[in-house]
Image (tube, grey):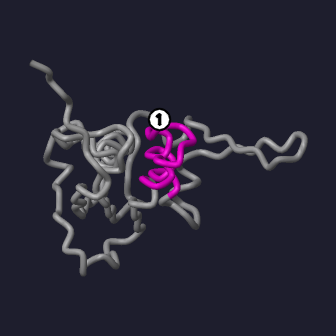
Amino acid sequence: MKSTTASLKPAEVEKKWIHIDAEGVVVGRLATFIANRLRGKHRGDYTPHVDCGDYVVVTNVDKVVFTGKKSTDKVYYRHTGHPGGVKSTTPEKVLGGRFPERVLEKAVERMLPKESPLARKQMTHLRLFAGGAHEHEAQQPETIDFKSASPKNTRSA
C-alpha cells in the first residue's frame, strides 16, 4: 500500500482577502503573521512551490510600533551603487517620512524566500496603506483582529 502526498495545483488554489488594522501593533509580530498568510502556511494543503497564500490588506501602517529602543537604535542600510555610497536611516525617520509603509514592506519581504520569482509574486499580494482607508472594499476582505490575538502583539507607549 503506497501513500502519496497531496500537492496543490495552481488552478486549484482559492485565494481569500484579509484586512488587518496595524495601529499600535508590534512590527515583527505583524510581519511574521503577514508572511505566513502570503505564503499560505496557514493552510492544511500548503505546497511550497505553489502560490497558495491570501491577499493581505493592511491599514494604519504609519502607526506601527517597535519594542524597546528599536525605533531609534535600529539602523536600515542601503547602497546607492556608487563607491562609498552606503546610506543609513532609522525606523523613526522612515515612519515619519513620505513612505512609512516601507518599514513593514521590508520586514515582510525579508521573511519570504530570498530572491525568487515566487517571493516576488507573493509580495504583489500585499497592499499597505498609511491611513485608515483602503481601496479594496469591493473584494470584501475578512477583517482579522490581530491586536487581541495575543497581549504581546500590541505595545503601549
In the picture of the structure, the residue carrying the numbered disc 1 is: 69
Residue at position x 76%, y 44% in the image:
79
Judge whether residue 110 is colored magenta. yes
Q: Which of 9 and 115 lies nearest the eye of the viewer?
A: 9
Total marks in image? 1
Residue 69, given in percent of the width and then of the height, sits at 47, 35
Give the magenta-colored segment's residue range.
102-122
Q: Quadrant of the N terminus?
A: top left
Q: Which of 18 and 12 lies nearest the eye of the viewer?
A: 12
Q: Which of 68 and 60 lies nearest the eye of the viewer?
A: 60
As drawn, the residue found furthest toward the top would be 1
Residue 118, given in percent of the width and then of the height, sits at 46, 48
Judge whether residue 119 is colored magenta. yes
Circle 1: residue type: Lys
Residue at position x 39%, y 60% in the image:
125
Q: Secondary structure at mark 1?
A: loop
Q: Horizontally, is 100 left or right of 21 in the view?
A: right
Residue at position x 38%, y 52% in the image:
64
* Image vertical order of residue 157 relative to residue 68, above or below: below
- The picture quadrant where one finds residue 19 is bottom left
